[in-house]
Amino acid sequence: MKYMLLIHAGAVDENGAAAECTVEDWMSYDKAVRDAGIHVSGESLADLVTATTVRVGPSGERTVTDGPFAETREVLGGFYVIDVPDLDVALDWAARCPGSWGSGAVVVRPVADFGA
C-alpha cells in the first residue's frame, strides 16, 4: 500500500533547513528508503518565499497571492511516497525520518487508490 509522508519542519535555520538534522541525516534516510525498495517518489520543496496561493471564490473569481500565509510556524518541507505492506510499517519509516525529530513532524496518509 502506498503512503505519503508529509514532512513538516517546526524550526528552521537561517537557510530554511530543518534545525534538528543535517544534510547527512537526510542523505542517509533517503538511501535507506531507496535501499529498502519502498521508494515511489519524493521531493524537497523550494523555499517558502517562492510559494503562491490560489483561491477561487463562489462566483468563480480567482485570487492569487504570494506565499501560503498559514497561521502556523510549521513549514511543509517535502514529501516521500513509499510502498509498504501496512500502516505500522509506514509509521516506522516516518519515525526514522529526520523530519520527525525535535520540533518537526511527519504526517502519514494513505494514497487513495480509485482503481481498486
Image (tube, rainbow, N blue to C red):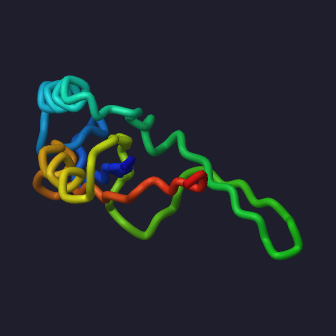
Answer whether residue 43 is visible to the viewer in this image: no
Establish if 77 lies above or below 87: above
Q: Locate the C terminus and report the quarter of the image it occupies.
A: bottom right
Establish if 4 lies above or below 37: below
The quarter of the picture where residue 25 lies is top left
Q: Nearer the viewer, residue 42 or 103?
A: 42
User: x%, y% of residue 60?
Assistant: 86, 67
User: x%, y% of residue 76?
Assistant: 38, 51
Answer whether residue 25 is visible to the viewer in this image: yes
User: In this figure, what is the number of numbered marks?
Assistant: 0
User: Taking 3 as reference, is 112 left or right?
Assistant: right
Q: What residue is at 80 percent from the left and 60 percent from the top?
A: 62
Most distant residue in the front direction: 116
Q: What residue is at 31 percent from the left and 49 percent from the top?
A: 7
Most distant residue in the right direction: 59
Q: What residue is at 53 percent from the left and 39 percent from the top?
A: 50
Q: What residue is at 22 percent from the left and 32 percent from the top?
A: 33
The quarter of the picture where residue 79 lies is top left
User: x%, y% of residue 45?
Assistant: 43, 37
Q: Nearer the viewer, residue 68 or 28?
A: 28
User: Taking 58 as reference, is 1 left or right?
Assistant: left
Most distant residue in the bottom direction: 58
